[in-house]
Amino acid sequence: MPQVDITVGGRKFQVACQSGEENFLKTAASILDVEASAIVAQSQRMPEPQMLLMAGLLLADKTVAIEDRLRAAEAKVAELEAKVADPVKVEVPVVPTAVTDSLKELAARAEALADEVEEKVNT
């Protein structure tokens, strides 16, 4: 099991981790170090356990805020997806059968007249 040297709040620690997780551990430690260093800058004499607790609480607070924003974003995405999934209802007017029948009759008469005119022109 690899041992990784990290620094948090100006204090050095040696931490064991699973093989292959060294970079993850170093990244996590650097995030914790940012918070701890800010706390140490404000109070030089803070005991190590209290400094680590405060840094952890600050990170937890940031995590909760990010999770809240994530939930809000997911809800917005779900809302938008629901709008896309429900197509807009479009009503198309239906032409009454009597009107279409009348139009068919007019078309037939027009064709008959055209045939008569064509017949007279050709004779």
Image (spheres, rainbow, N blue to C red):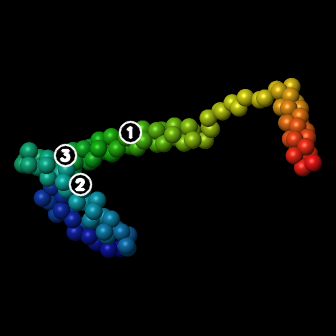
Image check: 75 left or right of 23? Answer: right
Compute the Cα span from label 1 to label 3.
27 Å
Residue beneath the point at 22% across and 60% down = 30
Residue 122 x/y as whole percent: 90, 49
Which amino acid type is shown beneath numbered disc 2? Leu
- Label 3 – label 2 distance at C-alpha: 14 Å
> Which disc number belongs to residue 88?
none
Judging from the image, what secondary structure is the residue with disc 1 in? helix
Which is nearer the eye, 44 or 108? Answer: 108
Q: Residues within 10 Å of mark 1 (few under 14, many from 20)?
A: few
In percent of width and height, residue 3 lies at 28, 72
In this rendering, the label closer to the viewer, 1 or 3: 1
Would residue 53 be visible to someone looking at this image? no
Q: Is residue 75 visible?
A: yes
Q: Is residue 70 above or below residue 88?
A: below
Q: Is residue 84 left or right of residue 59?
A: right
Give the label on residue 68, or none. 1
First of labels 1, 3 by sequence position: 3
* 96 relative to 112 in the view: left or right: left
Quadrant of the image occupied by residue 66 = top left
Closer to the N terminus: mark 1 or mark 2?
2
User: Mark 3 belongs to which amino acid?
Assistant: Gln
101 over 61 or under it: above or below? above
Q: Which residue lies under the disc numbered 3?
A: 50
Q: Residue 19 falls in which quadrant of the image?
A: bottom left
